[in-house]
Structure formats: C-alpha cells, structure tokens
Image (spheres, grey):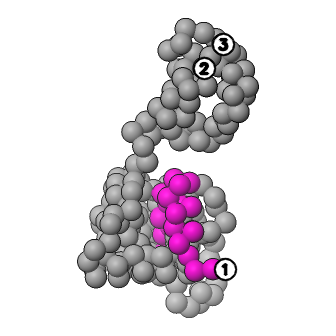
Amino acid sequence: MLARQTLRKLYVERKLSMAQVADTLGCSNHKVEYWLKRHGIERRSRSDAGYIRKNPHGDPFNLKTIVTKEDAYLYGVGIGLYWGEGTKANQYSVRLGNSDPRLIATFIEFLVKLFGVKRSDLRFGLQIFTDIDAEKALDYWSKTLLVQTTQFYKPHVTRSIRKGTYAYKSQYGVVTVYYNNKKLRDIIVNALPR
C-alpha cells in the first residue's frame, strides 16, 4: 500500500511524474497509478505533465507587481492590444499580428517587461505579398523589433491579385508575435473585459 500523504507530497506538491514517484518508492508505475486513483488524487493531463517537464522550476514567467504609472499604462495598453488584435481562438499560445512596428514593439515590451518573457523565446510569423522582397522584409522586422532572423518562421507569401488591391498595405508585410505558453495565454485572456 502506498500512503496517500506520501503520494500527495511526491506527486502533487513536488510535482514528480508517476515514473519518478515509482522510482523514488521502488515500485511500478501501475502501482502508483492504482494508488493515486484509490486515494482520489487526480492525475495530471498530458498537457500539464509536459508543461511541468519543460518547466521544472515553475512557470517561466510571472506577472510583475505593478507599482509605477508606466507599468500600469503598459499593462492597460498590452491588454487592450491583445483584446483588439490578438488571436483568442488558439488556446495554447499568445498571438498578435499587425503591420505597425510600434504596435508590435509595444506588445513585445508588455510581454517582456511585465511577464518576464525572454525576447529570445518569442517566435514570429511574417505574411507578405508577392511584390514584397522577403529578405528585405525579414531584415526590416528583425532590426526594428530587435530580434534574430532565426526567430522567424518561413514567410507566408500571398499572391498579389493586381496593383492597388490593398491600397494601404505595408511595404514590409504583417508580423505575428507568437509565445507558445497556454498558462500565459489564459492569464491574458482572463484579464480581457467581458
């Protein structure tokens, strides 16, 4: 028999995997699984287990305590930008796209300064028309946003139908910022006005 208190300490509090619990206690995974169920200790989803495995020291971000007016302003602007321009349908990542480099840079500052997201962990999508030079656009966005070109996915090229179809298009295309973290996505979405 595996004691409930022992399983709670190892599996729930220390967040060890079932295999790690089995190794620690010198028993099989099946035995750990059986006793978790018997004691009514809910098993983690695969998603949660994977998240813990990738982030053994806890979430890679935490919302900074907002004390200054500048931070409060940035928080309000960031939430507003996500509300208006962010992708709420994807449940696993924070995504925001636009052709305005100031808007994208402000949202990046929101993620980096207030949530501790590493700029190097951000990924970017670039959508351009066939009449836009891909290398030139990539170089422009990389320098403007202070990120590496290696952080960009392969550009998505849309065929230009005819000149003037999209009268005010950006000469450098549309960039989408991606930060693949379900928990941060949920925090931001839950802060949106309802």
Q: Residue 63: x and y, percent?
A: 39, 62
Dot 3 falls on a residue whose secondary structure is loop
Q: Closer to us: mark 1 or mark 2?
A: 2
Q: Residue furthest top?
A: 26
Left or right: 66 in relation to 88: left
The residue carrying mark 2 is: 3
Q: Is the residue 147 above or below the residue 86 in the image?
A: above
Nearest the eye: 154 or 94: 94
Q: Is the residue 181 above or below the residue 28 in the image?
A: below
The residue carrying mark 1 is: 161
Image marks 1 and 2: residues in contact by CB distance under 8 Å:
no
Q: Amino acid at mark 3?
A: Met
Nearest the eye: 106 or 1: 1
Dot 1 falls on a residue whose secondary structure is loop
The residue carrying mark 3 is: 1
- The answer to whether residue 137 is visible is yes
**Separation of residues labelled 3 and 2 (CA atoms):** 6 Å
Query: Which disc is residue 153 wearing?
Result: none
Q: Residue at x 39, y 57 (%)?
A: 62
**Separation of residues labelled 1 and 2 (CA atoms):** 68 Å
